[in-house]
Image (cartoon, rainbow, N blue to C red):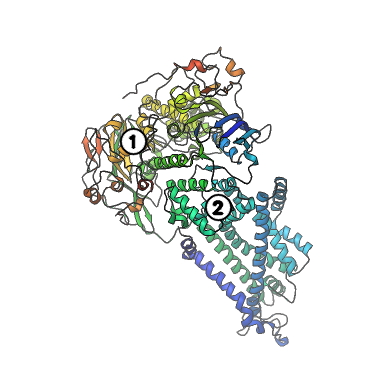
Amino acid sequence: MPTRLKWLSIVRSPVGATATVLVLLLALLAVFAPLIWGAQAEAIDTSGTQQGPSAEHLLGTDALGRDVLARVLIATQLSVALAVIAVVIGVTVGTLLGTAPSVLPRWAGRLVVGIVNIAVAFPGLLLALFFAVIFGVGTTGAVLAIGFAMAPGFARLTQTMSAAIAGRDFISAARAAGVSRLRVLIRHVLPNIAEPLIVNATVAAGGALLAFAGLSFLGIGVQVPAYDWGKLLGEGLNRIYINPAAAFGPAVAVIVAGLAFNLLGETAASVAGGRVTIGRWTLPPRPQPTTRAVPAFSTVSVGTILSIENLRVSYPTPSGLVHPVRGVSFEVREGEALGVVGESGSGKSLTALAASRLIEPPGVVDADRLEFNGIQMLTAPEKTIRGLLGTSLAMVFQDPMTSFNPTRRIGSQLAEAAQEHQGMSKKEAMKRAVKQLQAVRVPAATRRAEQYPHEFSGGMRQRAMIAMGLMNSPKLIIADEPTTALDVTVQRQVLRLLERVRTDTNAAILLISHDIAVISQSCERVLVMYAGRVVEDLPTAELYTGARHPYTRALLEVVPDLDTDREQPLGVIPGRPPAPGEVPLGCAFAARCPLATAQCREADPELEIHRDKHRVACWNPVESDTRVTLPELTAAAHTEAAPVATVGGAQ
Amino acid sequence: MSELRFDHVSVRYGSRSTGLTAVDDVSLTIPSGSVVGLVGESGSGKSTLARAAIGLAPVTGGTITLDGVDVTTLRRRHPIQMVFQDPFSSLDPRMTIGESIAEMIPRGTFSSAAAKRAEVGRLLKLVNLDPDRAGSLPGALSGGQRQRIGLARALAARPEVIIADEITSALDVSVQGSVLNLVRDVCAELELTMLFISHNLSVVRYLSDYIAVMYLGHIVELGPVDEVLNNAKHPYTRELLASVPTRNGNLLAVDPAAPLDVEPADPHHPPSGCRFNPRCPIGPLVHPERQICVQSAPQLPTTPGHATACHFAELTKDRLPQPFEPAW
C-alpha cells in the first residue's frame, strides 16, 4: 500500500476526519487568535467586571472586566505550544534514552535500561510534580517537568520497538558488513520505528495538554500575566457561582483539544497498524451458482465423505472482487488419503478452510455442492457446523502453537473436546485424553498431559493436535501443511502417525502440502492446484509416469532429488503464478507453459476425465512417455516476469 | 586462497547454570573455492556456527580463521558475507534495493557516487536483475527476487567466503531452482568459498562438494558429498537420509528395531556420552551392552576424507530400513 494513500485513509474515516479538522482549527487559532482578539482580551473594563454571559461578552468577563471568550481563544496559542514543546522534549529525550543501550558499551546500556525501568514505574503526574519542584514554579519549569515526565514512556517504547527491529536479518547484514552501530541506528532502526513513534507523540500531545491544564490549575504552571486554559479554568472556578460560563469555556477548550489530539493519534495508530482499510467495500450480491457441466460426480456416490462441486472463494478488494479459488470440484471417500499440492497462492489452504466453513468474512464461499457426511455445509446452521468441527471433522494446522491455548494444560484441552461433544465426565474425558496421547505416541503421556503447550517440542505439539482431533473419532482429518515447520525426521514420524490413524480408524485424510514428494509418499490420490483451480487429479502411483498436465510435470522436474544430475542446472518454471486479481483469460498456466497454443490463451480448459480416476484440465495434455523439456536456463528464465495478458478482476 | 577454518569452536549463550552450548567444540575446514554443505535439524547449531563466523554469535572457545588470520581481528575488511533465510526480513523495507546494496560496498572503494551507482548496476546484472530496478523498494519484489538482492548485497562487500543460511527454504519450488542455479554459477565464476546451510539434503547434495552433518552442537559425520550420502556411517545421517521425501523412497517404511517417536533431545540438558544415544537404532536402547555410548562421547577423527563420530560406525552397514509395502 503506498504510504501516501495509507495516510489519506485517516481522513476517510468519520472520526479521523473530525479529529483532523479540529487539530487544524486549533493550529489556526493558535496562530491567528492573538492577532484578531488580542486587543479585546487585554481591554480592562472596570465598570463591567465579573459579568455573566451577554451578547457583547458571550462567556462574560473576568475580575478586570476582560472578555473571557477572547482570552480562551488566545490561550490556545500558549496551551498548544506548551503541549507541543513538552512532547518534543519527551520524544527527543525518550528516543535518546531508548536507543542509547544499542550504541553504548554494554554496562552503560544496562545502567540506562535500569534507570528507565525505574522511571517508568512512577506515575507520570507524580514525576511531573517532582520535576516542577526541581525546575521551579513557572512556565519553563512546567514545560520541562511534563517533557521529562513523558521521556521514560517514550524511552521504553523506543527500546521495545528497536529490539524488535534489531532481530531482523537486515540489521545482521549491516553489522556483518561493518556498518557502525550508530549508523545502523540512524539508517535502519530509526526510520523503521518513526511511524509508531509519531503516532504515539500525537496521543501524548493530548495528554500533555491536560497535564498543563492541571498544573496551571494547581497554580504551579503558567504564572500571571501569561495565561493558558488551565489558568483560566482556575480563575473561572473561583467564581463558578457568579459566572459558570467563565469556567465552562476553558473546560470545553481543554476537552475538545485533548480529544482532537487523542483521536487523531488513535486513528493514525490504527491506520499504521493496518486495522483500517482504504475506502469502503460494498459486498456484491452472492454470485449465482453457475449452471455449467460438472464433468464428474454428478451425484454423491456411496462411501463419499466430502463432496465439493464448483467451489469458489471470493474476497472483496479495492479494485473489485477477486477469486482465489475458482471452481474446485472433488470428492474424498471414506478412509482415503487425498493430497492437495500447489505453490503458495494456489488456493489449496483456502479450499480446505472453505470445505470446513472456516472462511472469515469478508471472504465469501459459494459452491454448487458442499456436502460433508451428508450435511449441506453451505446451508447448515452455524450450530451444526460448530458441532461438526472437533467431532467428525478434525483440523490440523501448520503451527499447532497457535491452535492451543497457551495458558492451559494439554490434557485438559484435549479432555474439553470430549466433554463438550460427548458429554463425558471430566475424569473419563481426561482418561481418554491420555489414551489418545498414547495413541499418537507421545512418550510418558500421563505426565505430559499435565504440561503446557510451550513445554512440548514442535513435533510433539503436532502429535497432540492430532490427538485432539482424534478425541471424537473423526471421519475426515484436514491437515494443512502439518509438517512444514518440522524437521524431516519428525515430518516422517508425523506422516507415519497420520497413516496409522487412517488405517486404524478408517478416517479419510485431506493432506495439504507444497511438497509434491511428501504427497506422493503419503497419499493415494493427489490434486494439483494452480491459480485457484484443480489442474490435475490422479493416483499418486501414476504421478511420476502418467501425469499429463504440463504444470504437474514441471513441478516434478524442478524439485531436486537425491539422484538429480549435479552437472546440469536445476529445472526452473519461468515466470510466476498470476495473482488472484490478475488471472488471465485462458488457462492460467499458459504464460509459463512450454506447450501453450493460441487456444490456451483464449479459453480455460475444464477438468475432464482422462481415464479412470484421472482428471486433467489441459488443452494439450502431455503424452505419458514424452518428457517435457523445461526451457534452457537462460537469463530470460531467471527473471520472474510479471504474468502477461492480464485482465482486471476475474469476473 | 581463502580457506575458512573452524578450530575447536564453541558458542555458549547465557549463564553457567541456565546457559546453552549451541556449538560444542566443532572443527571444520572449508577448503578454498569449495562448497561445504551443513545439514542438521533445527537446534543443531548449524546457523549459530555460521553466525559466529561473521561475528553475530559470541565465540566462547576455539578460533575461526580465514587463511590463518583470526576473523575476529578483521575489523576493517569483511571478507565473509552471509545470505539470509527470510527474504522478507533481510532487506530494510524503507531503503531502496540500490541503497541496501551500496551500503555494503566497502568505504573508499569508489570515489564518486556515479561509480558507486555503476557498481550497484553491475551487481544487479550479476544476479540477473534489471539494473533499472535499483530504485525500487523491497516491497515491490517477489521472494525469489529478494533472495537475489540478498546475494548481490553480500557480493557488494567483495567477499571471499559466502555463507548461505537456508536461502531457499522460504521460496516456492518453482523459484528455488533459479536461485540455486544462480548461487552455484556466481560462486564458480568468482571462485568463492561457500558454507551452504540447509535442512534439505537434496538441495545440499546438489550444491556441495563436502557435507557436514550436525546433531546437537556436534559434527557427527563429515566427508565428500557422494561418500557421505552413498555410504553414510552415522546412524543419524542414515535416519536423515531415510526421512528425505524422494520419488523412490518410502517415508512410511518402519524400521522395527529403531526406537520410534523419541523426542528430540533438549539442548539445555544434552544427554551424556554420545548425544544421539537416546534416539540411536544401534545404541544402548536397542543393544543394552553398548554402555560406551552413554559413558563417552565419540570423537570425530581428524584424518582427511570421510569421518564419523560414532563408536559403532563400522557396524551400521546393513542397517537400512526394511522395505515396506503401503496398503494400496
Q: Residues within 10 Å of mark 2 (few under 14, many from 20)?
A: some
Q: Nearer the viewer, mark 2 or mark 1?
A: 2
Give the camera-side residue of A80 and B23: B23
Q: Amino acid at mark 2?
A: Glu
Q: Does residue B28 appear in this view?
A: yes
CB atoms of marks 2 and 1 within 8 Å: no
The residue drawn where x is 73% and y is 66% is: A142
In this figure, which residue is indicated by the disc labeled 2?
B103
Residue A66 left/right relative to A163: right
Quadrant of the rendering where the N terminus of chain A is positioned: bottom left
Q: Secondary structure at mark 1?
A: helix
Classify residue A512 by image quadrant: top left
> Do the residues at discs 2 and 1 belong to one chain?
no
**Residue B1 sits above or below residue B129 on the image:** above
Protein chain holding label 2: B
- Tell me the residue that label 1 is attached to: A556
Q: Would you say A543 lies left or right of A226 here?
A: left
The residue sitting at the front extreme is: B1
Residue A508 occupies quadrant: top left
* CA distance for labels 2 and 1: 40 Å
Most distant residue in the bottom direction = A47
- Front-most of A64 and B138? B138
Could you tell me which quadrant the C terminus of chain A lies in? bottom left
